[in-house]
């Protein structure tokens, strides 16, 4: 861990109707690091991302972005401060082209009025930014393809391009491989690796253990709303507590 984490949660807690969904979670990620969050179904991984990104408010503890307490800030304020996320379910405009989808995100970042009516013009700032992001995720050849007809793998890449267009410095990826055909996983892994290597800080919830362990710097294992282990992939894999939490699943 670096001394000054980019994103940190301290003693985070979420109680709903007496149930502790998130129970005293402390985690942090340093600049340019990639943290994987793994754990059995219902462990609290998505809820943790919801608390980090501002979709939910914790009943205890703090969320810190570059040392600033953002626990009570809205999703929009956190996004403006550089925190971006993708969701398990798709958030694309299926009837618009890939380029138009990314251009809308870029417009938000550039501060222009959102308009799907204005046709993308080569050379305007939002269109140029969108073209760059499509290139970055390997979708330049699909710029004019309707988002709805892209493969699941390409839809996931497009969602990442849309996120990048908002120029986040910290990125939360919630199960980026969900629904993606196994043959398309390696390409998507490469896209995420590129995004990370370009200097962005990445947090990723992912069920594909081989993907997580091969990509990240550190792994947090969640179980029943708590962090069971938080260490390098090698150390986590060797941890007997983690192995028993995953009883029946191979790590
Ligand atoms: N708004 C809510 N009200 C009540 N319970 C909730 C709420 N949101 C989540 N939960 C419960 O909290 C627990 C953690 O859910 P969460 O979706 O965060 O788990 P997860 O680790 O992301 O699971 P999965 O891997 O299946 O996506 C689950 O038992 C879920 O039913």
Image (cartoon, helix red, strand yellow):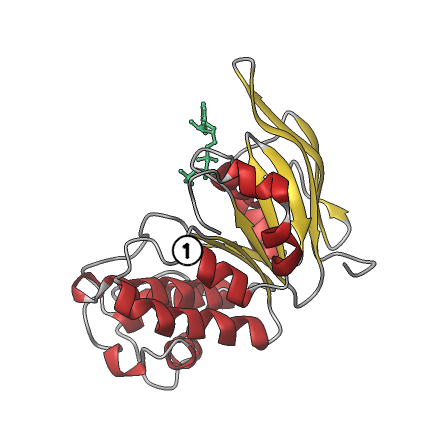
Q: Secondary structure at mark 1?
A: loop
Residue 84 lies left or right of residue 61; in this view the side is left
Residue drawn at x 28%, y 54% as measured from the top left: 179
Residue drawn at x 38%, y 82% as measured from the top left: 135
- Please name whichever residue, 16 or 41, is drawn nearer the observer in this view of the structure: 41
* Quarter of image, ligand 1: top left
Quadrant the N terminus occupies: bottom right
Quadrant in the picture for residue 93: bottom left
- Please name whichever residue, 157 or 219, is drawn nearer the observer in this view of the structure: 219
Q: Residue 163, percent across and down?
A: 45, 62
Q: Is the CB–ligand 1 distance for label 1 below 8 Å?
A: no
Q: Residue 236, percent across and down?
A: 62, 52
**Residue 111 seen from this side:** no
Q: Residue furthest bottom?
A: 123
Q: Residue 35, percent across and down?
A: 60, 57
- Please name whichever residue, 52 or 130, is drawn nearer the observer in this view of the structure: 52
* Count of marks, rendered view: 1
Residue 246 lies left or right of residue 98; in this view the side is right
Residue drawn at x 49%, y 64% as measured from the top left: 166
Q: Which residue is mark 1?
A: 208
Q: Residue furthest right?
A: 3
**Residue 22 seen from this side:** yes
Quadrant in the picture for residue 150: bottom left
- How packed mark 1 is, by other alpha carbons closer than 10 Å (few <14, some 14-19, many 20 or more), is some
Residue 215 lies left or right of residue 162; in this view the side is right
């Amino acid at each position: 861990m670096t001394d000054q984490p980019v994103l940190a949660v301290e003693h985070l807690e979420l109680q709903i109707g007496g149930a502790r969904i998130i129970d005293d979670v402390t985690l942090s990620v340093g600049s340019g690091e990639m943290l994987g969050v793994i754990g059995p179904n219902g462990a609290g991984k998505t809820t943790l991302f919801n608390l980090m990104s501002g979709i939910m408010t914790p009943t205890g503890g703090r969320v810190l972005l570059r040392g600033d307490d953002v626990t009570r800030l809205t999703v929009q304020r956190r996004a403006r401060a550089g925190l971006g996320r993708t969701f398990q379910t798709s958030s694309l405009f299926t009837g618009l082209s890939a380029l138009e989808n990314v251009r809308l995100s870029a417009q938000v970042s550039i501060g222009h009025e959102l308009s799907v009516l204005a046709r993308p013009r080569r050379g305007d700032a939002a269109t140029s930014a969108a073209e760059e992001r499509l290139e970055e995720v390997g979708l330049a050849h699909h710029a004019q393809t309707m988002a709805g007809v892209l493969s699941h793998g390409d839809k996931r890449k497009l969602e990442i391009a849309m996120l990048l267009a908002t120029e986040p410095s910290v990125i939360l990826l919630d199960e980026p491989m969900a629904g993606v055909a196994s043959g398309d996983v390696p390409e998507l892994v490469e896209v995420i690796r590129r995004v990370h290597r370009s200097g962005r800080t990445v947090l990723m919830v992912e069920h594909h253990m081989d993907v997580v362990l091969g990509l990240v710097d550190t792994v947090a294992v969640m179980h029943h709303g708590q962090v069971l282990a938080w260490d390098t992939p090698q150390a986590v894999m060797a941890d007997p507590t983690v192995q028993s939490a995953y009883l029946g699943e191979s790590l």
